[in-house]
Amino acid sequence: MHIGIIGAGAAAVALLDALAAADDEPSGVTVFDGAPVPWRGRPYQPDLDAVRVNAPPPIMSVRAGDPGHYQRWLEGRDVAGYLDEGLGQPLVPRAVYGEYLEDTAREAIARLSRAGCPVRVVRSAVTGFSRDGRPVLHTASGERVSVDRAVLAVGGGGPRDHYGLTGAPGYVNEPYPLARTLAELPADRHVAVIGSGLTAVDIAVALTANGHTGPICLLSRGGRLPFVQQRPVRMDAVHLTPAVVREHAAHGELRFAQLVSLMQSELAALGQDFDTLAAEITDDEDSVLRLRRQLEGVDAAHLGRRLLAMVIRTVGPTAWPLLAERDREMLRSRHFRTINSLSSPMVPHNARIVLRLLDSGQLRLCAGVTKIEARSGGGFTVHDGRSWTADTVFNAVNPPAYTTPTETQSLISALLAAGAAETHPAGGLRAEPGSRRLLVGGTPDPSWHVLGNLAADSMFIATNPPGLAAEASGLARALLGGRSIPAQRASSSSRARNSAGER
């Protein structure tokens, strides 16, 4: 079986690693991606040292069942200067994590090659396809490659220009790599950043590292900052585990209320109350006050947020495909940002820098933004109940979940036109749980699979490496006809733990 993998980011790395660990292997693999640097995706390109990984090593492994894989890779490297004192863990530059992805991909390719499965990397995007008994993938460079199975492993792509500012002097639609986009920026410029999430925090921190002295404004509708990550604590889930969730689903439709009840039981077993957690994640407290309080509570005794973050990562991939569709729609439409922030909170190192900037007045949170206009004489006018000007605008609003990347749209259009794919109401494509085969009218396509961002039926948060690794492992089993993939240096008990708490 010849497998074509479309995309060469973290999802593709996890899939290659899973295929290399299987008892059997495909006859060949071809990976397609037109990005300048393969395997790193958008976030992990070479960049400023100030742009760090937003999670500690134990929750950044791309090897399924082996949370220590990335941590072991870091051993022997000088990471002492990157210790986040709040977490007690090293948070290395994103470029270093990109090296880990590259090394993991190269190792997997070498293992597959030694097993008689050649791997070829085509440095061009797939723009369309045809059929000749099996899919024939058409690349932007004019090449055509026949495969038995094709896997869409594309990410979410870059930001969308919601205000029509592309081409205006001083507008930066794609901030990464910040080493390039900040290189010629005068230190005294008034910088407006569209968004207030992790990408906006990256920009503010990088500007500070570059010695920026001008004002910085984070523009958004609500003016909310991400949650602050807490110091990891070792926990073993008992009530809210993948096995328990599957058992509940076996007795009928899985409902969100059941997950809440299991969470309540989990907290009760720890001697803690659910109401404290509920108040923490639903409060409308002033963002600066909340940031200050959460920084002071990095070592807080209440385990609610830590437990919930662990559950989102470890139980979420199992629970999401089993949930009733009306509950999934409710979570997508009303709670996506909150859950995403809990799953990927701001690390204390960055939170302290942001708070210092806010306290000094150099950084402001500007809520209620309705319009941004390019001025004919240069600069921009921002409307947020008043009108004011900025010299430079960075776009830090990532695309919504399940959005098709711009460079993949022609291929998706071809799939839809050929009846090989069907859009999901939430975005992305319909896929069969387990096999991740594309669904059309409820019937799975035998040739096309999806992994990561476009799989609206498979994943809620498509950017967390352990979740991608688990999905990739299941997909590898499906591609190889259900043959097993052995566990890799990780016991079944360790997989159930909150590995972020392991020291």
Image (cartoon, rainbow, N blue to C red):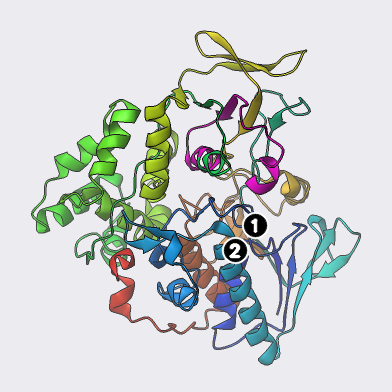
Residue 184 is inside the magenta segment:
yes
Name the mark on residue 219. none
Q: Which residue lies furthest to the left in this view?
A: 271
Tell me the residue at 53%/42% (across/down).
Answer: 199
Residue 416 shows in this picture: no
Across and down, in percent, residue 482 comes to 52, 79
Tell me the residue at 45%/62% (across/down).
Answer: 81
Name the mark on residue 98. 2
Q: Residues within 10 Å of mark 1 (few under 14, many from 20)?
A: many
Is 210 above or below relative to 491? above
In this rendering, would 337 be left or right of 129?
left
Q: How far apart are marks 2 and 1 (CA)?
A: 6 Å
**Quadrant assignment, res 500:** bottom left
What SS does tag 1 mark? Answer: loop
Q: Residue furthest top?
A: 386
User: Which circle's residue, 2 or 1, is located before the other in the chain?
Assistant: 1
Amino acid type shown at disc 1: Gln
In this rendering, would 344 be left or right of 494?
right
**Quadrant assignment, res 182:** top right
Across and down, in percent, residue 322 comes to 38, 55
Across and down, in percent, residue 263 comes to 21, 52
Residue 402 is inside the magenta segment:
no
Amino acid type shown at disc 2: Gly
Q: Which of 370 and 324 is in front in this view?
A: 370
Give the residue pinned by disc 1.
Answer: 45
Give the magenta part as a residue range. Answer: 176-204
Disc 2 to disc 1: CB gap under 8 Å: yes
